Image (tube, rainbow, N blue to C red):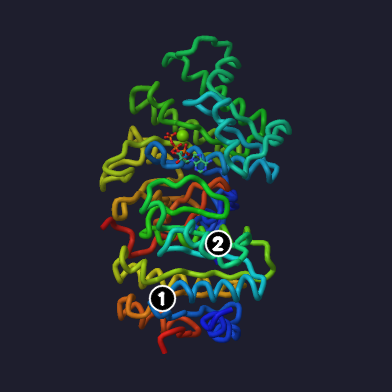
Amino acid sequence: MVKERPKCKTGIEGLDNILNGGIPRGNTVLLSGACGSGKTTLGMEYLVNGAKMGEISVLISVTEPSSKVVANLRGFEFFDEALIKNEKLYLLDMISLYARLGIEKKDYRIEDIDPLINIMEDIVKKLKVKRLVIDSVTAICHQLETKVRIREFVFNLGKTLSDAGCTSLLVSEVNPTGAWGLMPGVTYSAYGVEEAIADGIILLGAIERKGYMLRTLHVVKMRGTMHSLAKHILDLTPQGVVLIPLLKWGAESG
Amino acid sequence: MDDIDKKVSQKIKETKKYEVNLILSDINNYFRIIKGMMNYLVTERGMGGVYVSATRPSKAMISRLGAEKINMDDVFFVDSVSYMAEGPPASVDNVIFIESPTMLEMMMVKTDTLLRKAKSPDKFVFFDSINSLAIYNNENILSEFIHVLVNSLGGKDVYSFILSVKGETPKNIETLLKMVCDNVVEIGGE
Ligand SMILES: Nc1ncnc2c1ncn2[C@@H]1O[C@H](COP(=O)(O)OP(=O)(O)OP(=O)(O)O)[C@@H](O)[C@H]1O
Ligand SMILES: [Mg+2]
């Protein structure tokens, strides 16, 4: 028998089965998809489920203030605000991060990126973070400008997180080609370098069936475990993310 | 209780949980057969469950069955017709709307969701009807769906019924249904 690495259960119906038990601990996983594909919801459910299991779970929200994140979370049954009070779940935004850095200005410059990575590392270590979601890593990469710096950033971040035993989802915004889908040869990340460094890629997309859109999920790669490559339908419900195998004859539009 | 009601309850009273029953209905008695089924399951047996409406909007079924003095409080609807017919419906307790009858996977997953809501100790799933799905889905995907649906229903601690109107379902589909369902119950027109 091949021994698989210890797993971090996402607690999301269906996803743990697709991943043969969960995400291998310490992996840095790209959660890629176009806008509205369900990245934030899936990421939050992963964190909330972890927090409920007693693991320190942290969101670093780059694109939205955390007050907005909480407001959206209240619309989901899986959310429990007590997790925040009990310091199992932390929702941090750029304002709170920069406050830690002693920076007050709203728009930050490239020079501020290095201390930002440091502070993320600092948080992961100090709080003994087991689960981290950065929403989105694309927004940080925008600030880095060059591929070399992005590669360096993602690589260093991945290493720090993995050394700390933290299992991370890096939300990656990709441009839709057609309907949320990716054309063959198109990358899973905005800069094309994030995906090569990541240990895993979970791709959220969509298919069109007779004029109606269905959200989809499939695991493109996941180092350290066997996993299904099948495309699943992703249903965003008030109870959270639900995954259903896609009917094979319904995989293509028409 | 009219004749059809009696006939229906007689024909389905032997059905068991974990079995999938194909109800072949006569087109002229379509509503009366449904009424007979609900009368037996809900009124006589006190069951709750999930009604998958792919033929008539849930609103129409709820009001017509309600008018027949069938208590629909513990019956939950997966409705794949209203959206297509009338556009985005206002949210209704006990009903989950599906945008299109081509979203076959959604019908299954929403059935599971709603089964968890039904409170009665004995539960049913009633699928009304396969022939309507044949209008919007080709035979390949519909056949695949029937396989998955029957396997899914057959694994549940519920009474399952799939309605198909005789003469309205493509031949291959009807043959497949007869093959994969545990029992075939013909009502009306004999
Ligand atoms: N309470 C809810 N119940 C069900 N579905 C919801 C709920 N709230 C939002 N949604 C759906 O989720 C979608 C947004 O999902 P989400 O924010 O996770 O996507 P995203 O990929 O993070 O998008 P973006 O790139 O814009 O950040 C909405 O467009 C809506 O369809
Ligand atoms: Mg988002």
Percent coordinates x, y for residue B100 in the rendering: 37, 55
Query: Image quadrant for the C terminus of chain B?
Result: bottom left
On the question of residue A226 being in view, the answer is no
Percent coordinates x, y for residue A211 in the rendering: 29, 51
To the question of a shared chain for discs 2 and 1, the answer is yes
Residue hosting label 1 = B164
Three-letter code for the amino acid on which mark 1 is drawn: Ser
* Mark 2–mark 1 distance (CA, rounded to whole Å): 21 Å
The vertical placement of B150 against B81, above or below, is below
The vertical placement of B152 against A39, above or below, is below
The vertical placement of A70 against A250, above or below, is above
Percent coordinates x, y for residue B24 in the rendering: 43, 81
Percent coordinates x, y for residue B158 in the rendering: 60, 72
The chain ID associated with circle 1 is B
**SS label for mark 2:** helix
On the question of residue A223 being in view, the answer is yes
Residue hosting label 2 = B112
Q: Are marks 2 and 1 in contact (CB under 8 Å)?
A: no
Locate residue B103: give its quadrant.
bottom left
Observer-side mark, 2 or 1, equals 1
